[in-house]
Image (cartoon, coloured by chain):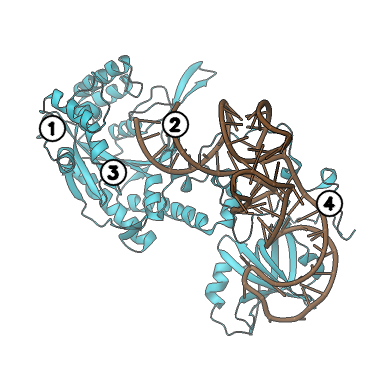
Amino acid sequence: MTERPAIPYRFEPTATAAALQASHGGIEDGTETGEVVTVAGRLMLRRGQGKLLFGQLQDQTGRIQLFAPANVTPRFAELGALSLGDWIGVTGEVMKTRKGELSVKVTDWIVLAEARRSFPDKWHGLTDPDTRYRQRYVDLWVNDDVRRVFLLRSRLLSLTRRWLEDRGYLEVETPVFHPIPGGALARPFVTHHNALDQDLFLRIAPELYLKRLVVGGFERVFEVARVFRNEGLSPRHNPEFTMLELYEAYGDWSVHMELTEQLVAHLATELCGSTKLTYQGRDLDVSAPWRRASMSELIEEQIGRRVDLDTPIAELRALCDEHDVPWKDGHGPGKLLLELYEKTAEAAQWDPVFVTDYPQEVSPLARAHRSQAGMTERFEGIVAGRELCNGFSELVDPDDQRARFEAQARQKDAGDDEAMVVDEDYLRALDYGLPPTVGLGVGIDRLVMLLADVSSIRDVVLFPTLRPEQERGDASPADAPTEGAEAPETPEPGA
RNA sequence: GGGCCACUAGCUCAACUGGCAGAGCAGCGGACUUUUAAUCCGUAGGUUCCGGGUUCGAAUCCCGGGUGGCCCA
């Protein structure tokens, strides 16, 4: 009786667990509806009761009990012999047991897939982080919260696209392979194109291509871009992550600050029911408007004295030393200011704030501030102490942009491997004319973390980057499928 | 890259100061017609992450390595 079951090529359920709970959850205990449905999923629990068998079928939407009396259910013994985790399709009448559990009375059933490896403990589940990330296909079944987070992520992207499209934004796709890495300060991954015999870089940001599209006349564009940065792994960094970038012609930074706070409030309302959130046990209100404060102001709040680009560099360095900020001779006042801010002020923020007025020295693609010398019209949105987004009035002047690129190139020559290089084609595009434009990048992973109330990026990325699994010396029998000649110690039951 | 912590059965975890490697769930055999992590009886299951060392004796102590987690850079 243990030959492999015939697996159909197609199966057509007529109901889901959640839909049944919603439509029939209210019927009285001990009643039958006469309504026959077909459901499918994995058998996750089983309780034999002699001539009666209870099971719990789990599908993408939730769980529904199976009620199988021996005198009603065909192949009753085989149903009881299924492994936990087997996929089955079940047809039967919707009913509620005397004890009040909505159920499907099994009048027909079929195996859709066998689970040859046993699922984790039905009560304690799977907790080992390494196994959870490597075997996400198991994690998704046994840890309910995991499924919730990724459903939220999917809905967040869908809502975001619709919201932007409703405002005239066009979704575009730009290259992942970049001949020149650009658009951010980060170390790229390098790969090689054989036919061209040329190194290519995986993009660290889509920025420069999206602005080329504004030059090309697409006035409002966005891209949900997977970007790649060659950095370490941590609870907040995955080497590949998702960035929403958008550009809007004719706008300045204030346009995208308003857009950001409205989008985030919209998503919070849709996905969490409110702009008043709880994040890691602490209240957080993301409703608009968010506070605006300059980098200098925020530093001053923390260290008790005003610093800006006019502060003598010796004093800035002394302050860095005082606050354990490492600095180098090549760092100008702008870089020192940014480092001081990141060390002393960023993590101290909790409620949303737009940090404004970033130094030109550290913002090579942002337009000069209209009233603050040496500064740019750049902002970052900080929520719960972490950078959520970064945007600015775009630098549109080709001569200024060339000078900024060249300053970056000098830093690169001086050993800064995150610095930019001169992108001649981008300068050529600017030569054709980029109108006043605002741009914004939003860290989608961090936004999901915020709204799903999780603290590690690995919990919002389905398959986070991990070291490759170690090859064992030989295949461990315990790790192999309990099948065939490899497992002679397992007698064929009932043969 | 540095610091701290963890790694024991398929899963979740025990094993005191170095003294016979254990339990629950899952598995396997059996009982049970209203269960809810069902219950009950029986049974099987181990490279204690890997490699060295100390010791009469190591899951436990020491050294080196691996993987992961958290913190820092």
Q: Earlier in the sequence, mark 3 or mark 4?
A: 3
Residue under numbered circle 4 = A490
| Circles 4 and 2 in contact, beta carbons < 8 Å | no
> Mark 3 highlights which residue?
A347
Task: Look at the image and tell me whether residue A247 can be seen.
Answer: no
Q: Residue at x 64, y 79 (%)?
A: A95
Mark toward the start of the polypeptide (2 vs 3): 2
**Which badge, 3 or 1, comes first in the chain's sequence?**
1
Are the numbered discs 4 and 2 placed on the same chain, yes or no? Answer: yes
Image quadrant assignment for residue A206: top left
Name the chain letter of the residue that bears numbered label 3.
A
Residue A52 tag number? none
Count residues near mark 4 (Cα–Cα under 10 Å), then give few for <14, some for 14-19, many for 20+. few
Q: Which chain shows up in cyan?
A: A
Check disc 3 and report its element: helix, strand or loop. Answer: loop
Chain B drawn in what color? brown
- Vertical position of residue A488 compared to residue A403: above or below: below
